Image (cartoon, rainbow, N blue to C red):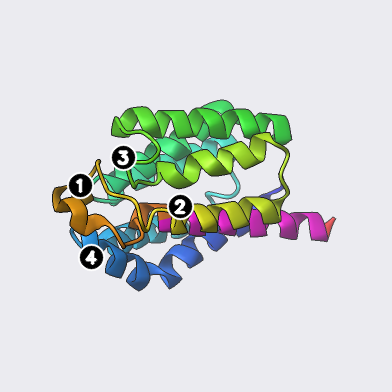
């Protein structure tokens, strides 16, 4: 993965979080403490502020810096959870990953988030996007299939009863709302797929 692609990845993810910050905050206002979009935007703004020096680093080092920044800058549970995902990717992805390496690394990253949050898929959290997307990756699904599953999985959190996280305090009132972490995860995954597709187009 060349430096231009790494820079596009960071810019794409940061931009989508910034563009959807109000939407994410509104989702969190309905079933959480109303700061998910604001917090996540602060974290990814800090990440983007380090470009292009950040993109000049090898992929694992870049991901490690992103994860560390998110842990430090994003408040609430989101910082540790998203930070853990990127830090685990940093541990397991080589500088030039192939699909097999990506599948293995994302599986470990999703498992690390699961352990960090002490949660399970089905509890109305970001895991309800990470695990279905991982299944599509393992099955050899295309980028478009990954994006479609991410969006569909976020939608599937709407009828779920939250049993983990702040939304669980609402009990039945959590039903009927999309989980903000699931939504932000789906947006980030789509941005990554788009950046990697653009890399293929340039070749």
Q: Which corner quadrant of the image does residue 10 belong to?
A: bottom right
* Upstream in sequence: badge 2 or badge 1: 1
Image x and y of residue 146, in percent: 63, 50
Say which of marks 2 and 4 sits in front: 4
Residue at image point 20% right, 47% down = 168
Alpha carbon distance from label 2 to label 4: 18 Å
Q: Which region of the structure is painted magenta?
A: 183-201
Q: Are there few (<14), some (14-19), or many (20+) residues within 10 Å of tag 1?
A: some
Task: Identify whether 123 is placed above or below 75.
Answer: above
* Upstream in sequence: badge 3 or badge 4: 4
Alpha carbon distance from label 2 to label 1: 19 Å
Q: Nearer the viewer, residue 32 or 194?
A: 32
The reply to whether the C-beta atoms of the residues labelled 3 and 2 are less than 8 Å apart is no
Q: Which residue is mark 4?
A: 30
Q: Which residue is mark 3?
A: 80
* Upstream in sequence: badge 3 or badge 2: 3
Task: Identify whether 36 is placed above or below 81.
Answer: below
In the rendered view, does 24 fall on the left or right side of 154? left
Image x and y of residue 6, in percent: 62, 51
Mark seen at residue 168: 1
Task: Identify whether 141 is placed above or below 189.
Answer: above
Q: Count of labels shown? A: 4
* Upstream in sequence: badge 4 or badge 1: 4
Element under disc 1: helix
Say which of marks 3 and 4 sits in front: 4
Q: Is residue 194 magenta?
A: yes
Alpha carbon distance from label 1 to label 3: 19 Å
Element under disc 3: helix
Q: Which residue is mark 2?
A: 185
Assign the N terminus to one quadrant of the image: top right
Q: Which corner quadrant of the image does residue 27 belong to?
A: bottom left
């Amino acid at each position: 993965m060349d430096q231009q692609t790494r820079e596009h990845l960071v810019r794409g993810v940061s931009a989508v979080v910034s563009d959807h910050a109000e939407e994410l905050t509104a989702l969190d206002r309905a079933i959480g403490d109303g700061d998910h979009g604001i917090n996540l935007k602060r974290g990814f703004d800090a990440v983007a502020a380090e470009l292009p020096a950040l993109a000049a680093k090898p992929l694992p080092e870049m991901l490690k810096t992103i994860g560390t920044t998110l842990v430090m800058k994003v408040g609430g549970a989101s910082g540790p959870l998203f930070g853990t995902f990127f830090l685990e990717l940093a541990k397991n992805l080589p500088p030039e990953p192939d699909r097999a390496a990506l599948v293995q690394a994302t599986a470990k990253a999703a498992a690390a988030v699961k352990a960090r949050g002490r949660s399970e898929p089905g509890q109305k959290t970001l895991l309800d996007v990470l695990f279905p997307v991982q299944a599509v990756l393992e099955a050899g699904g295309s980028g478009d299939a990954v994006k479609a599953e991410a969006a569909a999985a976020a939608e599937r959190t709407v009828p779920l009863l939250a049993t983990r996280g702040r939304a669980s305090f609402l009990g039945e009132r959590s039903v009927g709302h999309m989980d903000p972490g699931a939504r932000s995860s789906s947006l980030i995954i789509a941005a990554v797929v788009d950046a990697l597709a653009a890399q293929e187009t340039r070749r």
